[in-house]
């Protein structure tokens, strides 16, 4: 078990940032959009026109304080910050990480939660995790660009990513056209769907969802140590649902 000092220092740096986001959910009208896109990873193809029904989605990623309220209510189990069950990718390998309590700031996105814990929190708030299609629709908004703000490359002024080296408090950067914060960067976000590499080839044109069986759950959006490619809205990734990771959090839909 290894404690990553750079993570502790990075999270501590985030304490002084302003938080501009308002709590609550944004109601999005349903509509059609292009899911996936050509010219990138194989699992983003073929692109397809799909339709999603109206839904509400959290304005920000779920914070440590919000998640802790579920723990206090005994509806959620504690995040895996200090029990050796949280992972971090270092030098190409996943390593167990311990984050001391004093560095788990209340206004940053909760991480080190596995898929079941994220699902339990959303149920506590009368919701669930978004499907990949819902997440992508929400992230795009009225924008057809690569990132939630457009095609301009990621920078320290736009999102928490590899050049920032730390997660930022929820809502520290400008929102997208839907009024949603941190759809690009800060933390990867769990989705409801199981991951399937060729999902888009067989996806339903209406409210597509992942397969009924599968080893991994899909994550979207990129995190605080992601590079520009990983931060693309169309980027698909996956993680073992029984594990927490220092750059994976979530938001809920209803």
Image (cartoon, rainbow, N blue to C red):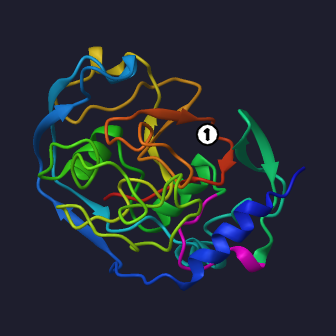
Res 251 visible = yes
Give percent across and percent down for residue 79. 69, 63
* Residue for point 65% across, 67% down: 10
Give percent across and percent down for residue 144. 15, 43
Pick the front one: 81 or 29:
81
* Residue for point 49% across, 66% down: 124
The residue under label 1 is: 241
Give percent across and percent down for residue 55. 22, 56
Please state, as top left, top right, bottom left or bottom right, where the C terminus lies in the image.
Answer: bottom left
Dominant SS type (magenta):
loop
Q: Is residue 109 in the magenta section?
A: yes
Instruction: Please state if 115 lies on the left or on the right of 139 as rendered.
Output: right
Instruction: Please state if 201 lies on the left or on the right of 250 as rendered.
Output: left
Give percent across and percent down for residue 24. 33, 75
Res 81 visible = no
Pick the front one: 25 or 88:
88
* Residue for point 32% across, 68% down: 59
* Element at label 1: loop
Count of residue discs: 1
**Which quadrant of the figure has residue 72?**
bottom right
Instruction: Please state if 118 lies on the left or on the right of 30 as rendered.
Output: right
Pick the front one: 156 or 63:
156
Part of the protein shown in magenta: 102-111
Label 1 crowd (10 A; few <14 / some 14-19 / many >=20): some
* Residue for point 84% across, 59% down: 83
Q: Is residue 218 in the magenta section?
A: no
């Amino acid at each position: 078990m290894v404690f990553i000092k750079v993570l502790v220092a990075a999270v501590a740096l985030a304490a002084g940032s302003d938080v501009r986001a308002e709590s609550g959910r944004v109601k999005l009208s349903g509509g059609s959009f292009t899911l996936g896109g050509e010219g990138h990873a194989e699992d983003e193809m073929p692109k397809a026109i799909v339709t999603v029904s109206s839904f509400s989605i959290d304005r920000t990623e779920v914070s440590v304080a919000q998640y802790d309220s579920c723990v206090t209510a005994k509806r959620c189990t504690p995040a895996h910050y200090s029990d050796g069950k949280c992972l971090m990718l270092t030098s190409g390998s996943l390593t167990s990480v311990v984050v001391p309590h004093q560095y788990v700031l209340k206004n940053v996105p909760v991480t080190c939660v596995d898929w079941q814990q994220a699902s339990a929190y959303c149920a506590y708030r009368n919701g669930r995790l978004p499907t990949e299609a819902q997440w992508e629709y929400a992230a795009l908004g009225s924008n057809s660009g690569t990132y939630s703000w457009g095609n301009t490359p990621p920078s320290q002024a736009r999102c928490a990513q590899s050049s920032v080296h730390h997660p930022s408090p929820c809502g520290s950067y400008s929102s997208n056209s839907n009024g949603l914060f941190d759809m690009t960067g800060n933390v990867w976000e769990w989705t409801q769907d199981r991951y399937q590499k060729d999902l888009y080839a067989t996806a339903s044109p209406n409210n597509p969802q992942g397969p009924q069986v599968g080893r991994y759950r899909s994550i979207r959006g990129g995190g605080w140590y992601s590079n520009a490619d990983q931060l693309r809205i169309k980027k698909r990734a996956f993680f073992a649902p029984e594990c927490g990771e220092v750059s994976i959090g979530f938001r809920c839909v209803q």
